[in-house]
Amino acid sequence: MAAVNLGSTGAHGGRGTDATGAPGTPHRGRKPEPATSAPLAPGAIVPGATPAAQAGPEHVTEPTAYDAILLAGFGGPEGQDDVIPFLRNVTRGRGIPDERLEEVAHHYRHFGGVSPINEQNRRLKAALEAELARRGVDLPVIWGNRNWDPYLNDAVAEAEARGFTKLIAIATSAYSSFSSCRQYREDFADALADTGLGEGPDAIQIDKVRQFFDHPGFVTPFIEGVRDGIAQLVGEHPGLDGATEIEVLFATHSIPTADAAKSGPAERGFGEGGAYAAQHRAVAEVVMREAGAAEVPWQLVYQSRSGPPTQPWLEPDVNDAIAELPAAGRKAVVIVPLGFVSDHMEVMWDLDEEAMETAQEHGLAAVRVPTPGTHPAYVAGLVDLVLERVHGTPVAERPAMTALGPWYDVCRPGCCENARLGFKPALAGIAP
């Protein structure tokens, strides 16, 4: 999900980039302003969509000739001078003073002001390009971020300059919630409105691949990680009983309970925690089963909460859960960053620093398993998701490892509303 969660959207700030996303000659070099309306083709239901998706089917089974892939990331600072401008971007509209932002900034400053997330996305972009070339798929990859260079309006401007008008977007977030899905769709609307490229006969259209929480490409690295993590603990601690003395904690970003309740389509009736919690639990069950660890205790935990203490967020916190493990007879813990596609600040700080320190304080052996990153299965899976839309793959032929999927190509009405701000213009879904 996000590298920090203090709010939504952002203000101006940041260095310019060249067309590859590396620091260089500036073009737009700023986060776009919020859109006030989304481009809507005459008679269409889905704004800014390609013709195959405009009528709003749950799954698009009509082949679509896309021009390019839009890789959409969260963004992160790449030096000490970037940290506060980046956090201003993240929290625009919240009225949070720089003094409060500096309290969060120390996480970044601990690592030299550099979040690994941009480098992770550079590597993912290169890996996607290599996999596309290996398969003979001629689809360029354009990278844009929500909160830092290269911004999404930079990416859209690049697409226009290269003559691309039909983009299929991959957001670097697997689950359903406002911050992990709908906000990216709002970002697409913002980028088109900011550049003026969502209107007219040559308007750019942006579709989005389905949420991929239960796609084998995303799940496989975690299966391997849990299997290897348990084996590592048992190997390093002879006599450790994996069935009773190890617990697996599946960690994901906490979100306000009000937002969680609105995640996913309301008609699905997911109950407490909404689709967000339901998807994580379903994937965790699959991971434990496929890792051959069905008898090992596990639980879903949350991390990185922010906001006032009076606002309810999803619990339990990962550190609170770790603190309770010794009383349950546990001697070791496997921490699985199930909610994250790659290492970034919240994985490195909240898990590698704080959670591991908590485990040590309570006498627990601990291992944190890898995120998908550029795992070959993950990269191949993302290309598979793109090709589903290119070929119009029938639903029955789309892989999904839980009963919840395959998820929707076109987000359903009312999906993942921001409980605080309501609905804003967004692409790749039926309005609102």
Image (cartoon, rainbow, N blue to C red):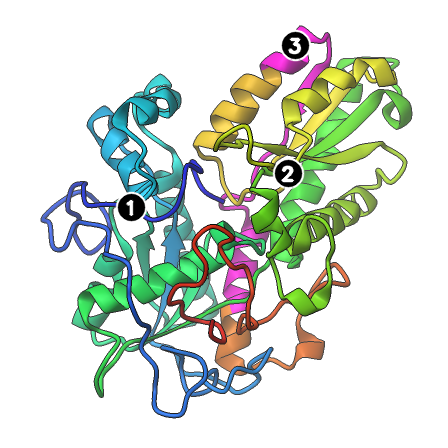
Amino acid under disc 3: Gln
- Which one is earlier in the sequence, the residue at label 1 or at label 3? 1
Residue 205 covered by magenta stretch: no
> What residue sits right under mark 3 in the picture?
360
Q: Which disc, if any, is residue 314?
A: 2
In-image side of 371 versus 107 (left or right)? right
Q: Is residue 286 above or below residue 410?
A: above
Tell us which disc is closer to us: 3 or 2.
2
Q: Which region is colored magenta? A: 357-385
The residue sitting at 34% across, 64% down in the picture is 188
Question: Is residue 345 shown left or right of residue 227?
Answer: left
Residue closest to the far left: 25
Distance, label 1 to label 3, CA atoms, is 37 Å
Q: Residue at x 56, y 52 (%)?
A: 378
Dot 3 or dot 2: first in sequence order is 2
Identify the mark nearer the N-term, 2 or 1: 1
Q: Nearer the viewer, residue 423 or 69?
A: 423
**Helix, strand or loop for disc 3:** helix
